[in-house]
Image: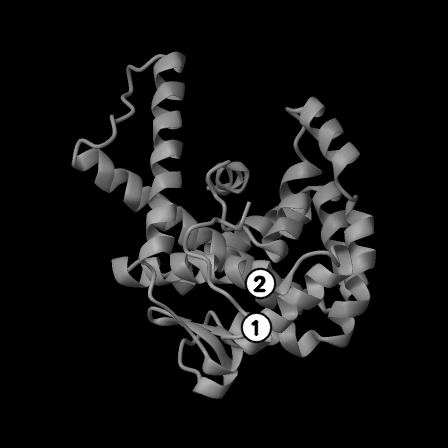
Amino acid sequence: MENKYAKLLKCAVVFVIIILAVLSIMITGVINDKDNEQNNALYAKDRPTLDDVFESTGEYVRNHKNLLKEATKSLKTFKYPDHLVVAQIGDVPLTISELEFRKGLYASVNPAKGTNDIFNELVENKIFINEAVQRGFLPTNAEIDEFLSIHKEKYKSDPEYRDGVDKLIQSWGISEDEYWQEYEWYNAYQIIVMDKVYKDVISEAENKSKLPIIGIGDNNSEVMKKQELQKSYWVQYTMKLKKQADVKVNNKFVNELNFDPNKWYSS
């Protein structure tokens, strides 16, 4: 099961990973990726270190813990009064609190990031959650608990992983329970949504002969070729989803926020 989620986190086609999940990837993937030293060197050259990110985001999160809680809550219930919602994406709301929290996080690490870009990234995220709603694939409590259990075991057994988690907890001024039940719960939900939707989309395409099925007897070259076809199909599918998405922006924000159906912002 751990390999399943590790591969998903590193998958190039998963465009919806947002800043919270990015921090999780930095802990779970970059620190422990012993198999690709060249990529690690490039990452270290072009990206801030974990310590840099924790220091930059720490003060903001410590002063806005309520927004972290609200971001997690927004995935546990989709029923919000209109005055608390920035936009409605199908059956899924984007709350003001989640947008404000994301804006604050980005401002602490990348002040040049525009509000409209952040808004579009969040809308893209909600589009996938709405797709999971339509397909009946929202994460179950059991699936999230399993995800958390895997990472809790890693926390116990892997000193480097544990060090990264401990640094985040200390920098953000949150308890260990808040880390697992809010921050990591939020990540687990997003990742499982992507896992389910991606697999169902690809399976559906294979069943309709739109994609070739990867067979047990396929050699490495054949597998790689079919995987590239899957990635290409997924990219096209995501853009189709966004173009067809039912996005209603709250009248209070229509002059400030522009939903762009023809561009993908999460990358």
Residue 185 visible in image: no
In the rendered image, which residue does mark 1 sit on? 256
In the displayed structure, 76 sits above or below 17; it is: below
Task: Find numbered disc 2 in the image and state the secondary structure of the residue it sits on.
Answer: helix
Tell me where residue 95 appears, x and y as whole percent.
51, 75
Q: Which of marks 1 and 2 is nearer the N terminus?
A: 2
Tell me where residue 157 appears, x and y as whole percent.
67, 43
Q: Answer few, some or many: residues within 10 Å of disc 2's Cα (few below 14, many 20 plus, some between 14 and 19).
A: some
Q: How is the image coloured?
A: one colour
Q: Is residue 143 left or right of residue 133?
A: right
Q: What residue type is labelled 1?
A: Glu
In the rendered image, which residue does mark 2 sit on? 116
Tell me where residue 229 appears, x and y as whole percent.
35, 27
Q: Which amino acid does label 2 sit on?
A: Asn
Q: In which quadrant of the rendered view does residue 159 lie?
A: top right
In the displayed structure, 161 sits above or below 136; it is: above
CB contact under 8 Å: marks 1 and 2: yes
Q: Is residue 223 left or right of residue 203?
A: right
Task: Find numbered disc 1 in the image and state the secondary structure of the residue it sits on.
Answer: loop
Tell me where residue 142 appears, x and y as whole percent.
41, 60
In the displayed structure, 71 sits above or below 250; it is: above
Q: In which quadrant of the rendered view does residue 87 lie?
A: bottom left
Task: Indicate which disc residue 215 carries.
Answer: none
Residue 30 visible in image: yes
Q: What separation in Å lies between label 1 and label 2 (alpha carbons)?
A: 8 Å
Residue at 53% of width from left, 75% of height from top?
255
Residue at 51% of width from left, 56% of height from top?
188
